[in-house]
Image (cartoon, rainbow, N blue to C red):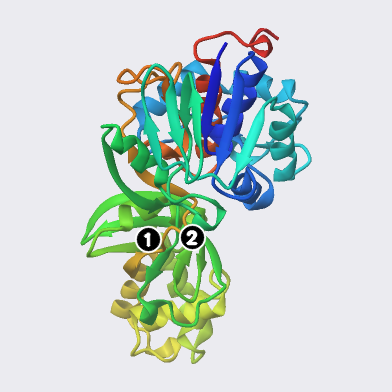
């Protein structure tokens, strides 16, 4: 038992605080904002998708994330939440939410389960190792046997993330990669998407470099005034943030129809429509504004169905399978759900989150170079790593239930 200072009152920090205090440690949470857990309240559109029961998906730091989740798997995390009185439910694609559907329920369970002190409005500016750790804020110095750094990355700065904890660990000699937005929207060539704002379509999304496919996702795409959004687009962002890459949308992927069959279908429609506007060929599987945009993109010279000859029909079908949109960039940290990059996790033990370089120092959550897909993976890693840091190799009573 000892004195523990936790830097950051987010998901990882609060899970750590609950665990350490219940195991008998004297715990103080230092939070730079005016209250803890602001980012938790915003997750999952205010519903808090706190884990995922499917296989873990971590494009950043996958090996380390898997080791952490082996030490604190979903069944143990579920027991942790049940020990705090929080009931959960599984929804589509393995996503797990509080049964209330309210993120505030998760935050309340953590706040009420924590037995210790919370000091807000305290940004840590210096860490001094020694027989006792010295934790310095703007006007105070705290002393501790153990320090757990959980201050997150840079995503959603209005909710408290500013990258300061990455800088703290770098000042102690820990390596770190550049902090970049991840799980964010794309800005795109406005000529191609003109007039499409607000349209949604389920399709295959590919990130392309010339004719080489870099990454693919399936899901719902939302056209916006600035570009593209939707979960599948956000999961493409890390691959799309390279000059010269583009997005390809396969607009009839959901129909499970080959290019040859689509060509035959449109020829049949052509025979029925005569002098109708050319976009009428696509009525029935594309909304009118999107149909107009595809015709404008593929066969701008064709105003009516009668203008569409065989070679134009082939171009139209190819455009339906490869509606190419130039990428101008990705949205910044204000829009990003998570940070890509951070402190190299290699020096930290994935079963305790303890540093091999400094006795009594731990790190957990988004401050580390680990980031997952949408669907609860990032919060799951934050909670798992926070719990492990709080346990520090000890056995918690709820693990035996």
Residue 88 image point, x, y percent? 72, 32
- Residue placed at 58% from the left, 8% from the top? 395
Q: Quadrant of the N terminus?
A: top right
Front residue of 59/273: it is: 59
Residue 307 located left or right of residue 30: left
Q: Quadrant of the C terminus?
A: top right
The residue carrying mark 2 is 335
- Residue placed at 41% from the left, 46% from the top? 164
Residue 6 image point, x, y percent? 53, 31
Query: Residue 365: in sight, yes or no?
Result: yes
Vertical side of 116 occupied by 325: above or below: below
Front residue of 188/216: it is: 188
> Based on the displayed image, in which of its 4 quarters is residue 172 positioned?
top left
Q: Residues within 10 Å of mark 2 (few under 14, many from 20)?
A: some
Vertical side of 286 occupied by 130: above or below: above
Q: How many marks?
A: 2
Vertical side of 313 occupied by 178: above or below: above
Residue 50 located left or right of residue 240: right
What is the CA distance from the residue labelled 2 to the residue labelled 1? Answer: 37 Å
Residue 259 got which mark? Answer: 1
Residue 273 image point, x, y percent? 52, 84
Q: Residues within 10 Å of mark 1 (few under 14, many from 20)?
A: some
């Amino acid at each position: 038992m000892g004195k523990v200072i936790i830097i950051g009152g987010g998901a990882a920090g609060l899970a750590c605080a609950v665990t350490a205090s219940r195991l008998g440690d004297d715990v103080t949470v230092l939070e730079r904002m005016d209250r803890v857990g602001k980012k938790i309240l915003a997750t999952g559109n205010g519903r808090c998708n706190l884990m995922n029961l499917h296989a873990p998906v971590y494009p950043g730091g996958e090996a380390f994330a898997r080791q952490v989740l082996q030490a604190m798997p979903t069944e143990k995390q579920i027991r942790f939440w049940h020990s705090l009185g929080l009931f959960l439910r599984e929804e589509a694609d393995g996503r797990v939410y509080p049964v209330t559907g309210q993120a505030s329920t998760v935050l309340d369970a953590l706040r009420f389960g924590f037995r210790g002190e919370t000091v807000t409005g305290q940004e840590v500016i210096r860490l001094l190792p020694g027989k006792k750790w010295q934790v310095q804020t703007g006007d105070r110095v705290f002393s501790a046997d153990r320090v757990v750094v959980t201050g997150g990355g840079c995503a959603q700065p209005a909710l408290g993330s500013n990258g300061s904890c990455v800088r703290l660990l770098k000042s102690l000699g820990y390596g770190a990669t550049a902090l970049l937005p991840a799980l964010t929207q794309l800005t795109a060539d406005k000529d191609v998407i003109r007039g499409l704002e607000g349209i949604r379509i389920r399709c295959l999304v590919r990130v392309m470099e010339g004719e080489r496919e870099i990454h693919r996702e399936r899901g719902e795409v939302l056209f916006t005034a600035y570009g593209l959004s939707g979960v599948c687009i956000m999961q493409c962002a890390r691959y799309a943030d390279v000059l010269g890459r583009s997005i390809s949308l396969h607009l009839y992927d959901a129909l499970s129809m080959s290019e040859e069959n689509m060509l035959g279908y449109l020829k049949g429609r052509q025979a029925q429509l005569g002098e109708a506007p050319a976009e009428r060929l696509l009525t029935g599987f594309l909304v009118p504004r999107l149909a107009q945009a595809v015709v404008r993109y593929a066969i701008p010279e064709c105003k009516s169905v009668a203008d569409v000859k065989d070679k134009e029909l082939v171009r139209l079908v190819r455009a339906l399978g490869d509606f190419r949109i130039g990428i101008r960039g990705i949205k910044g940290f204000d829009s990003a759900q998570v940070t890509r990059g951070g402190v190299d996790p290699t020096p930290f033990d994935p079963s305790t989150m303890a540093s091999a370089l400094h006795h009594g120092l731990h790190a957990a959550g988004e401050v580390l170079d680990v980031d997952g897909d949408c669907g609860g993976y990032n919060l799951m890693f934050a909670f798992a790593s926070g719990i492990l840091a709080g346990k520090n190799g000890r056995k918690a009573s709820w693990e035996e239930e």
